[in-house]
Structures are given as C-alpha cells and as structure tokens.
Image (cartoon, rainbow, N blue to C red):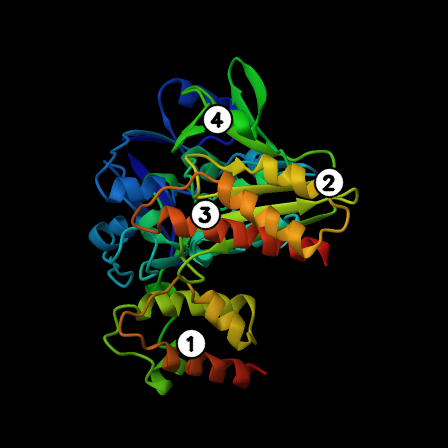
C-alpha cells in the first residue's frame, strides 16, 4: 500500500509492503539516514522524530499508520545549524556522535515548547536518549547555556 | 500489507472483526515486529478515532497517552504515568495499549486495581465493562475477545481521599518495575493496596488491607504488621530482573511508605 504524509514540510509518500517501522522507511526508502537505528525497542532514542508535534521513537511507529501525519526528522530542523545544534557544537557535546541526531531532535522539541528549561527539565526531556559514550555532562552544559541565553 | 485508518469506532470494529490487529501507540507491538516475533499483515490503527482519545470525567478513552495521564490524571495515576518508559514512550504509548499488552509489570495497572476501576470493551455485538480483576486473566492474557476493542478505563464514581504510587527499579527512566504499587486511604480509614510485577496479574493484598483499615490511627506496630502481611500476600517469582525474596521485601516496604505518605 502507498502511504502519504508530510515530511520535513513537503508532501511525501512511501510504498509499505510489510509492517516495517517509520525509521526503516525514512532510512531505506526516503534517503534520510539522520535518524539512527540502534535498539529497535524504544530504549535509546537515537531514532527520535517529531510526529504530529510530539517526539517519538520512529522505530516504534508502524509506517503504515502515518497516513496523513506530519513528520519532522533531524534533516528537517532548518537550514544550517539551529540554536540547539549550535550550542552542542560550541560545547563539544559530541563524542562518537551516533546519539547526537536523536538528542538534537529531542532537545529542539524541548526548546520549542519550553524556551528556558531548568536542569531538571533538560535531564527529564533527555531521559529517553542514551549516549553510550556517557557524554551527558557536556550535553547538559550545552543546553543549560542555551537556556541561559534564552533567559 | 493492509493498514486501516478509521476515524470512527464502527469502522475500527469492522476491521477487527475481519481479523485486523489493533494498533494503539505501537510501543509494545512494534518491538515484537522489530524483533521478528510477529509479522501482522492486516492492521487497524486506532489513533484517528476521536472517541477513543477523549477523557470525560471518569471515563478515560483507551487512546489517551501516558503523557496526558501524567499531566491531568488523578494523583497516583499521574505518578504512575510519569514512570512509564521515557518522554518518547509516554508521547506514543496509551492506557488502552498498556491494558491490551497486560504485562504483569504494567505501571498503570496497580492504580486501576487499587481504586477498583473497570475496563470497557466494545464489539459489534455490544459494550461491556469488566472489573479490572475479571479483565486480567494471566501473564499477557486478558478477557478481551478477538473481535473486541478496549475502548476506555472507567474510574469509580468517587476516588479515595488519598492515594500514592511508587515503583522500585534500577533507574528512573526506561525501567521495568521490580515492584510497583498503589496504596489508597479514605477518610474512614478504608485502605487498599495493589501491586504490579509480583504476580501473573496485578493483585491486591486483602488481608493487609483489612487489618490496616481497622486502625483509625495506625501505630508503629500496626504499620509493621501491614508491611509483613503485604510481603506474605504478594506472589512474586525469581527472574532476570529480581528474586522472589527481594520482591516480597520491597513490596512490603513500598506499601508501608506509600501508606505513610497517605497518612501525612
């Protein structure tokens, strides 16, 4: 079956022949490898996308069920670096970088909805994004700095 | 592969009757798919059905997400919702999906058991509301018939004055409970205590409840007896997550602390 939806601000469609995830469709059919495939069980957050204005794990979204929905991936967060990406870049808040796209999507959603989050809110928002290099200190410092700028 | 996207309950029920697998938030179903355990080729997505996402007074639609329960649920239910998965999981996962999966560790179940909530099931033949205790029949087994959809949780007309949720696990986010519990205490002392992860289904501790309900102002020794009875009444097993002995101990301690919170 063909599904149609909005992807990063433009109409998109995909052919879905099996109960595959949105993540698989993004990476394998639509040429958007920014969302990473790691745990496939919603534990790690590396595949985070914004679906109908909420951050979700795209590995747990059945592609056949997104008909008519709006999806934003890390590739669709705007031209160049957005303020979250800029803050992470400046703070060196990247080690191997594999979790970074998921963290960028999750943190961008946080700052969109709550421009001046406190530390607890930052940590809570990122509770579903695992950095296996354990680089959390720099990530939280980067986002704390951004929240202070916003203040 | 066929996926239905109905906007009305009637269309969804027709699809389910024709054999479509109901899909709520996907947070359990897709794990099974990703790991190759199941491969449903006929699915009905339920998230476009307004009726299932509505929350009217004490009837909470099955497609209400944990994120919504976290922000507007009754205290202990909101506390439980806050411990489900991660923000991503709470944005997608629903209370109806949680019931459909019927994991013994489901964080939402103890609240429903503690307040004697009902589960509404609908098929093309009619609507029925089952007591929570009739709904859960075993590990990941429920009384839902294949042609039925879980449509709502029905709370009692009045909730106990105080209620609190607690969960023991190895970290805050993304943790499956070693033990989780809800204790309620009403103005007249009536107390309920319900537990998850310590039996094939959510369970209550009736002897502990009866004993402590008769204590208008529980003393230290009454609290200790309550704790002891809870540890005795739960029916945990040893598995990869914990041991039977630890779960018994933790259930007792947790129940006592939650009761103390209700008494404050």
**In the image, which disc is placed on residue B248?**
3
Q: Position of residue A32 (x, y in %)?
A: 26, 59
Judged from the image, the secondary structure of the residue bearing numbered disc 4 is: strand
Mark 4–mark 1 contact, CB under 8 Å?
no
Q: Position of residue B171 (x, y in %)?
A: 41, 62
Residue A73, picture quadrant:
bottom left
Label 3 and label 1: CA atoms lie apart by 46 Å
Residue beneath disc 1? A84
- Asked if badges 2 and 1 are on one and the same chain, I answer no
Mark 4 Cα shell of 10 Å, populated few (<14), some (14-19), many (≥20): many
Residue B28, picture quadrant:
top left
Q: Residue furthest front?
A: B221
Q: What residue is shown at x 56% (from left), y 69% (from top)?
A: A114
Label 3 and label 2: CA atoms lie apart by 23 Å
Judged from the image, the secondary structure of the residue bearing numbered disc 3 is: helix
The chain identifier of the residue carrying mark 4 reads B
Residue beneath disc 4? B149
Residue beneath disc 2? B214
Judged from the image, the secondary structure of the residue bearing numbered disc 1 is: helix
């Amino acid at each position: 079956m063909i599904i149609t939806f909005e992807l990063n601000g433009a109409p998109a469609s995909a052919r879905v022949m099996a109960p595959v995830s949105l993540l698989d469709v993004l990476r394998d059919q639509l040429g958007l490898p920014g969302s990473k495939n790691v745990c496939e069980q919603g534990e790690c957050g590396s595949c985070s996308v914004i679906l109908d204005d909420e951050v979700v794990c795209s590995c747990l979204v059945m592609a056949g069920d997104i008909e008519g929905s709006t999806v934003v991936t890390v590739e669709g967060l705007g031209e160049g670096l957005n303020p979250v990406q800029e803050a992470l870049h400046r703070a060196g808040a990247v080690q191997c970088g594999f979790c970074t796209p998921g963290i960028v999507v999750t943190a961008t959603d946080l700052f969109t909805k709550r421009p001046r989050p406190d530390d607890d809110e930052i940590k809570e928002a990122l509770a579903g994004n695992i950095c296996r290099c354990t680089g959390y200190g720099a990530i939280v410092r980067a986002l704390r700095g951004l929240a202070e700028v916003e203040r | 592969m066929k996926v239905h996207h109905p906007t009305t309950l009637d269309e969804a029920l027709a699809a389910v009757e024709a054999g479509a697998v109901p899909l709520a938030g996907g947070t359990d179903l897709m794990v099974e798919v990703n790991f190759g355990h199941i491969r449903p080729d006929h699915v009905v997505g339920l998230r476009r059905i307004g009726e299932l996402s509505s929350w009217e007074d004490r009837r909470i639609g099955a497609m209400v997400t944990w994120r919504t329960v976290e922000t507007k649920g009754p205290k202990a239910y909101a506390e439980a919702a806050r411990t489900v998965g991660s923000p991503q999981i709470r944005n997608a996962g629903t209370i109806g999906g949680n019931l459909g999966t019927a994991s013994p560790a489901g964080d939402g179940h103890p609240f429903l058991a503690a307040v004697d909530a009902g589960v509404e099931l609908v098929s093309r033949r009619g609507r029925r509301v089952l007591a929570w205790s009739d709904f859960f029949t075993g590990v990941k087994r429920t009384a839902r018939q294949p042609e039925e959809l879980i449509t709502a949780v029905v709370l009692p007309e009045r909730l106990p004055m105080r209620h609190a949720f607690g969960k023991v696990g190895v970290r805050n986010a993304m943790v499956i409970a070693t033990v989780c519990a809800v204790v309620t205490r009403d103005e007249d002392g009536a107390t309920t205590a319900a537990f998850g992860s310590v039996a094939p289904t959510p369970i209550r501790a009736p002897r502990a409840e009866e004993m402590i309900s008769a204590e208008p102002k529980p003393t230290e020794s009454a609290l200790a007896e309550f704790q002891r009875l809870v540890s005795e009444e739960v029916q945990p097993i040893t598995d990869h997550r914990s041991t039977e002995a630890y779960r018994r101990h933790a259930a007792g301690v947790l129940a006592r602390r939650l009761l103390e919170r209700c008494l404050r």
